[in-house]
Amino acid sequence: MDTVARIDDVPEEVTRAGLDFDYVVWTPGTIVTLANVPWNSDYRDVVRFSSTATLNNYINDDAGPIVTLNQMMYAIPGRPVRINIPFNAAYKYNYLRVFNPSQPVPGGDSAKTFYYFINDVRYIAPNSTELDIQLDVWQTFSRDITLGNCYIERGHFGIANEFANSDHGRGYLTVPEGLDVGGEYQIIHSDTETIGATQYMDNTKTFDIMMLTTVSLLTDPGTVDDPNLTTARGSAFQGLPNGGELYWFPDLASFNAFVTAVAPLPWVSQGIISIYAVPNLLEFGLSYNEVEFEGVTVRRVIGEPYPSTQLVFSVPENTGDWKAGILEKIPVRYRHLTKFMTYPYSVVEATTYSGTPLMLKPESIGSDIHLTFRMMLHLTPPGPRVAFYPENYNSLTGDNTVTGPETPGGDNNEFLDMITGIINLPTFSIVNNGYISFLASNANSLAYQHSSADWSQQKALTGAQTSFEQAGRGIGLGQQQTALTNRTNSAQTALQNQVAGQRAIVSGVNSAIGGIGGGAAGAAGAVVGVANAAADYAITTGANSAGSAITQQQNTRSNNLTSANAEYMRDSNLNYAEFAAQGDYQNAIAGIQAKVQDAQLIQPTSAGQVGGDAFNLAAYRWALHLKIKMVHSGVIRQVGDFWLRYGYAVNRFGQIPSDFHCMTNFTYWKLRETYITSSSCPEAFRQTIRGIFEKGVTVWRNAEDIGTIDIADNDPLEGISL
């Protein structure tokens, strides 16, 4: 059985549907117009003409063969139709329009034009050609439906939305795209704010120096022979208690002058516990007192610097809108794509070149006019540092002071959770003379040792002299005792002689008396007796005197020998004691001098520490550097062309414009949910319209633009918003 729709395929029973003209039944008088159109049946591109008349005029301008049917014909979906046109005249066309000008007909129907795609053309006979056709649901029924609030997944709606840049772009432009952005950024713009007055490339790098000491510089330090060490009187810089005194040097010259002055006073400099470089502080409100120290002016810190200082970065090309100024760096065709000024397509890097860069999302920066940072200083140990944070980062729109305690600059947003800075300030040391330090620290003990050596010598010499005098006194005593013995012996001899004389007298008297009584013989005997007595006396006294003289001589010679030996011992002991005392003194002095000489070999000591990150300070400078980076030029073109063609990811509900246009030439739509609120077409065609939008479709304003115009030639319309 032949199933091809033919003109003579008239139903056996004529019904009302068979007499009415619709997209299935073409009644007699229907005019079929063949044409070529740039859109096709896959509905990737459709044209939204301003009216049906405009569409028909477009078809009429370049229409092909026109055929008027004289019999009813079925145009059932999936079945071909045959028209009386030669094959060579028909195969050149891809579209046809069907219209019956006799409509409306009884029954209330109205004139309707139907549009079909020609999917295939087949030769049947010399003047008969078979066409596979498919109803163009869009051109036939798009004006018969109304879309409601639909979920827009992607499209040019995101570019045309007049509120796209609200909340710095966070409201609509931060929807992830899932596009490859490459592995590196390129620098679009950079700016620098130098910290303090550090210069670059002219060998005049200047910076301030802070010093913390535990020894006070407010009192007389004394001398090496009489040093004076006074404990520091403390400080309360930046609200932090500190037992040390804090001093500030505005330049290297003032610090070097202090180092020169304190060099001979190591007992003072050894109390320096920290020396470190800081930015120039006068511009930050530092206050101080000038103090004279050994003829040099030092500055004791008494007042704090400002809690924070604002650093403002401007884009030179456009100081009123830094994002617009940055977009001027990219090709003109992409400058209206402000999504390039959101992460991950661009990023703002703040760095001090110290290894702690801060990567900021442009849409989270609190101002579209300027890029502003706050600098905060902490300049006392422990951990002095200079920190920078972006002002009002991640702030609420129109509210930069959210509920919470006040912070420097009135920033209650990310604040110190987003910082970079000079975290490890360079630290330095000064060298102390260990020899002088030893002498000063041992001044009293060395004086004591000298005094002790002198006392020991004087004590030894006095002891030797005392022994000498005592020995001399002993010699004199021996001599006196010998003289006394001799005198005693002489007295005893004289006494013996006297007694002998007296006895001789008595004996002579007795002899005389007896001789007288005895006569002459007796007298002569008496005379002889007297003479004997006298002779005996003379012998006795002589013997006594001789014995006494011998004894005295013996005593004298013995005493002389003893005295000579005692004098030798006395003199030799004195000489030895004097020698020993002198030697002990010289040895003690030599020991003291040896200590002093050894102290000269004590290695120099240092005060403060050597550390921190000094590379930038030595090789470059201290500064906050701002770099605005964007994906490299190749990615800009790739992503930019994608956005120009298909718009941004939206992922929000919105009302589709009634003419489906939000751009001047073409608008891409991809919906996740398509709500049709009213229609005057069968459900199958409603679902077709829904499918067209949910798979993604480009709605063109002018059919001749499809595939011919530059996709960048497409500007947003005004008044488009979600």
Image (cartoon, helix red, strand yellow):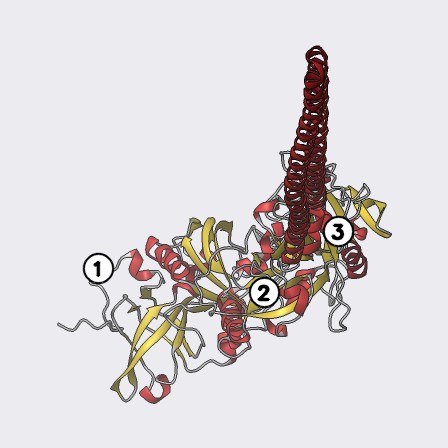
Q: Identify the secondary structure beneath mark 1.
A: loop
**Closer mark to the observer between disc 1 and disc 2:** 2
The answer for how far apart the CA atoms under marks 1 and 2 are is: 63 Å
Q: Is residue 652 visible?
A: yes
- Vertical placement of 721 versus 319: above or below? above
- Vertical placement of 121 versus 117: above or below? below
Horizontal and vertical percent position of residue 42:
36, 69
**Residue at the disc numbered 1:** 13
Crowd band around label 2 with a 10 angstrom C-alpha radius: few (<14), some (14–19), many (20+): some
- Which residue is situated farthest in the front direction here? 520
Q: Residue 337: which numbered mark, if any?
A: 2
**Closer mark to the observer between disc 3 and disc 2:** 3
The answer for how far apart the CA atoms under marks 3 and 2 are is: 69 Å
Left or right: 1 with respect to 525? Answer: left
Q: Is residue 110 visible?
A: no
Horizontal and vertical percent position of residue 101:
45, 67
Horizontal and vertical percent position of residue 451:
72, 42
- Which residue is situated farthest in the top direction here? 517
Give 279 or 380, whichever is nearer the viewer. Answer: 380
Q: Identify the secondary structure beneath mark 3.
A: loop
Give 83 or 170, whichever is nearer the viewer. Answer: 170
Q: In which image quadrant can residue 520 be found?
A: top right
The N terminus lies in which quarter of the figure? bottom left
Crowd band around label 3 with a 10 angstrom C-alpha radius: few (<14), some (14–19), many (20+): many
Crowd band around label 1 with a 10 angstrom C-alpha radius: few (<14), some (14–19), many (20+): few
Of labels 3 and 1, earlier in sequence is 1
**Residue at the disc numbered 3:** 265
